[in-house]
């Protein structure tokens, strides 16, 4: 079993680190926030005094941080303190450009690196059922896979450095757009006097079928496990959807890709979050869509 440093003990990091402990790894953890460190300690991790101290003697280092600037700043401190031939894995969702810079920095210091953003949310983190989308060299991926398997169910190698982040924002752009499409369809159905169940029964077995409808239906009833049945508690918060759609827009601009629906979806979720709904599940966007009709 390996010694693993884990930096960034937030909503995702705490349960992910706990699963590594459960799998028998020695986890040395660090976060800026004392309450997060205490939680990780009660889950069985050793706590380091700083990010740099946590990586001393670690064979694998994992970061799970809010954004690209946090990852670059933390990697700048810790990568030079890591041993030659060790491995660093960033599981945060960050912009593709920062991810590539982080890989280049690690390579300059003889440290193997993988970007491995996740899908599956806090439930997936707790249940060790996350999907990891990985970018980096084949050898680094092979070394990362057995560690990621203790926190997730599906581990996909998407290509070279930054490819994991690219896959994540492309997937979430599909999700953001399709949730609005499904919400508009239910909103129109309501105006036309069509019941939620009737639209669901037809669309879920017709060409309108998609994950946003069949697994995460934005109206209560047809899919009992969807957040719509639980007052739109996340799940996946609208603020995080705004973040991912904004990253997709930045990447589209930088790469010269046309994504007009992605841009519009970003604006719609941004408006919803600005109305005080940033911590509402993103499927709650149906409330915003209904409200638009009244304007
Ligand atoms: P979070 O804000 O709960 O946790 C981030 C943690 O990083 C915090 O505890 C913070 O104190 C810590 N941190 C920040 N700067 C630090 C530093 N310099 N050194 C040490 N610790 C530092 O965020 P989260 O929900 O755990 O998400 C983490 C990442 O995973 C984000 O990039 C997010 O977009 C992505 N993600 C989140 C979800 C989700 O459902 N929450 C789902 C998929 C992906």
Image (cartoon, grey):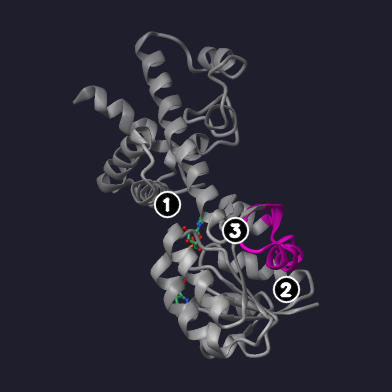
Circle 2 or circle 1, nearest the eye: 1
Q: Which residue is mark 2?
A: 21
- Mark number for residue 240? 1
Q: Is residue 224 magenta?
A: no
Q: Is residue 138 visible?
A: yes
Quadrant containing the N terminus is bottom right
Give the residue pinned by disc 3: 160
CA separation in Å, label 2 and label 1 = 27 Å
Q: Earlier in the sequence, mark 3 or mark 1?
A: 3
CA separation, marks 3 and 1? 25 Å
Disc with the residue nearer the chain's start (2 vs 1): 2
Q: Residue at x 42, y 47 (%)?
A: 241
Near-viewer residue (194 or 94): 94
Are discs 3 and 1 less than 8 Å apart at CB? no
The image shows residue 225 at horizontal and vertical percentages of 60, 36
Task: Count numbered badges in the picture.
Answer: 3
Classify mark 1: residues with Cα within 10 Å, few (<14), some (14-19) or many (20+): some
Q: Residue at point 57% right, 22% down?
A: 209
Q: Secondary structure at mark 2?
A: helix
- Does the residue tagged 1 have its C-beta within 8 Å of any atom of ligand 1? yes
Picture layout, residue 210 above or below residue 276: above
Which stretch is magenta? 127-156
**Image quadrant where residue 69 sits:** bottom left
Q: Position of residue 184 (x, y in %)?
A: 38, 23
């Amino acid at each position: 079993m390996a010694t693993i440093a884990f930096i960034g003990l937030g909503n995702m990091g705490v349960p992910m680190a706990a699963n590594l402990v459960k799998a028998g790894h020695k986890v040395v953890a660090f976060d800026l926030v004392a309450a997060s460190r205490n939680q990780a300690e009660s889950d069985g991790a050793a706590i380091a005094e700083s990010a740099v101290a946590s990586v001393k003697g670690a064979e694998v280092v994992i970061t799970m941080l809010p954004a690209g600037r946090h990852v670059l700043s933390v990697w700048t401190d810790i990568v030079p303190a890591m041993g030659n031939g060790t491995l660093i894995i960033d599981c945060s969702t960050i912009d593709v450009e920062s991810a590539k810079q982080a890989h280049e920095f690690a390579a300059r210091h003889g440290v193997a690196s993988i970007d491995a953003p996740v899908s599956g949310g806090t439930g997936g983190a707790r249940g060790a059922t996350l999907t990891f989308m990985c970018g980096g060299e084949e050898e680094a991926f092979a070394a990362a896979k057995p560690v990621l398997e203790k926190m997730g169910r599906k581990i996909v190698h998407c290509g070279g450095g930054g490819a994991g982040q690219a896959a994540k924002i492309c997937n979430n752009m599909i999700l953001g757009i399709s949730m609005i499409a499904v919400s508009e369809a239910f909103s129109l159905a309501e105006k036309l006097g069509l019941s939620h169940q009737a639209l669901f029964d037809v669309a879920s077995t017709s060409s309108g079928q998609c994950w946003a409808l069949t697994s995460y239906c934005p109206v209560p009833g047809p899919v009992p496990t969807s957040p719509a049945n639980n007052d739109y508690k996340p799940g996946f918060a609208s603020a995080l959807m705004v973040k991912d759609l904004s990253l997709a827009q930045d990447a589209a601009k930088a790469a010269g890709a046309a994504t007009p629906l992605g841009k519009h979806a970003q604006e719609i979720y941004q408006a919803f979050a600005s109305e005080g709904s940033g911590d509402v599940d993103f499927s709650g966007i149906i409330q915003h869509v209904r409200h638009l009709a009244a304007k």
